[in-house]
Image (tube, rainbow, N blue to C red):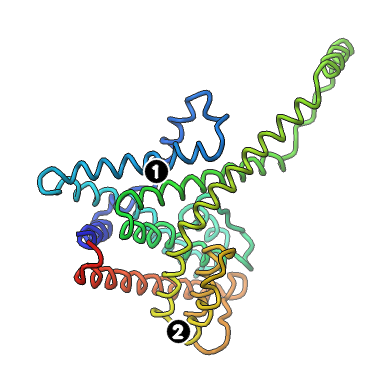
Amino acid sequence: MKFLILFISLLLQQQLPWARRWGQGSLYDRWLALWQRWPGFERLGAPIRLILLVILPSILVALLFVWLESFAWGLPSAVAEVGLLLLVLSQANMGAGLKRYREHLTSGDIQGAFHCADEAVSVPGLALSSDPETLNAQVLHTVLYRWFEYFFLMVFWYMFADVGGVVLAWLTLHFVRAQEALGQQEGASEESPEQPEQPLEPKQQTEQEQQDAADDPSETVGSGDQDAGKKAQADRVSSWCLHWLEWAPARLLGLTYCLAGNMTMALPVWRQLLWKKAIDSQQVLVDVASAALSFSHEKRCWHSAAADCPAAAAELDEWQQLHLRSVSIWMVGIAVATIGGWLL
């Protein structure tokens, strides 16, 4: 049943133009805004926020779908699962953005390619650099990671933990991305030059000095340290949860790259990175995919936009073909597991 629901979701996603734009809005932002209306929400610790924003709604959605399965032979539940997968998997759609990026890159318009990649290809919370030497490599790595996060990660947890698993993975991913985006905004505001202060009148200056003397500086420093500590704790908690949610799917996808590409080169790299828990998922996927796309026993070198724009654009097609072959392998594997009775 899961394979059929997933197959219908992918088919509708490709055939319906409006379905390709699902999930591009700020659904998680609206969910977060509901909680931020509560005055005490900002004072909650990171584990409590994770429970309220991620774990609790995942459990409630899972219970809702279990309840729907008791009606009309489970048809309402199946229809709702198709809609949920359309919403979640639509964020992996980058076809139009990649096409525009390739067109700009082929024509030599580096600035246009950067703006297109930053708007349509980049992962929320992960900024791209406009440096022509590193732009194409960053786009390749970001596209690969986005395909993983919004397709393979979601499909993996849907297969092994049903609706609750995919909702948990999706909310955790957006929880982490929101923390990263907030950190980038705070860093940018700290780096921006401050406006010069206007000179005060003598009377105002005296009153200001008296006010500064009356204030307790230790209270201000302590408050800043406390806020920084809460933010660091939230970052650690969210990153730890996402790391272990991604650990198994990333290794499984890395093995898929071995099957879809040059296994002779990719398999040793995959075995070397398999049990290294400290390495993040993006690095594992990039290393294995780069080896899988190698033509010989030498490490593949990728062209930069500054050196050869058409060659850099053509290399993006190779990564996209690797992704499509990997999707086919996963769908065939899920179908075989469904026929064999290992997945329901």
Residue of label 1? 25
Q: Is residue 14 above or below residue 273?
A: above
Mark 2 / mark 1, whichever is N-terminal = 1
Residue 262 is labelled as 2
Tag 2, which secondary structure?
A: loop
Between residues 313 and 139, which one lies in front from this camera angle?
139
Disc 1 residue type (three-letter): Gly
* Residue 300, image x, y percentages: 56, 81
Q: Is residue 237 above or below residue 256?
A: above
Could you tell me which residue is drawn at 55 percent across and 58 percent down?
A: 114
Label 2, label 1: how far apart the Cα atoms are: 38 Å
**Residue 298 location, quadrant:** bottom right
Q: Quadrant for the N terminus, please.
A: bottom left
* Residue 74, image x, y percentages: 15, 48
Front: mark 2 or 1: 2
Could you tell me which residue is drawn at 44 percent across and 36 percent down?
A: 52
Could you tell me which residue is drawn at 32 percent across and 56 percent down?
A: 158
- Residue lying at the far top of the rendered structure: 203
Q: Residues within 10 Å of mark 2 (few under 14, many from 20)?
A: many
Between residues 170 and 18, which one lies in front from this camera angle?
170
Tag 1, which secondary structure?
A: loop
Q: Quadrant for the C terminus, please.
A: bottom left
**Residue 97 location, quadrant:** bottom left
Disc 2 residue type (three-letter): Asn
Could you tell me which residue is drawn at 46 percent across and 69 percent down?
A: 251
* Residue 264, image x, y percentages: 47, 87
Q: Residues within 10 Å of mark 1 (few under 14, many from 20)?
A: few
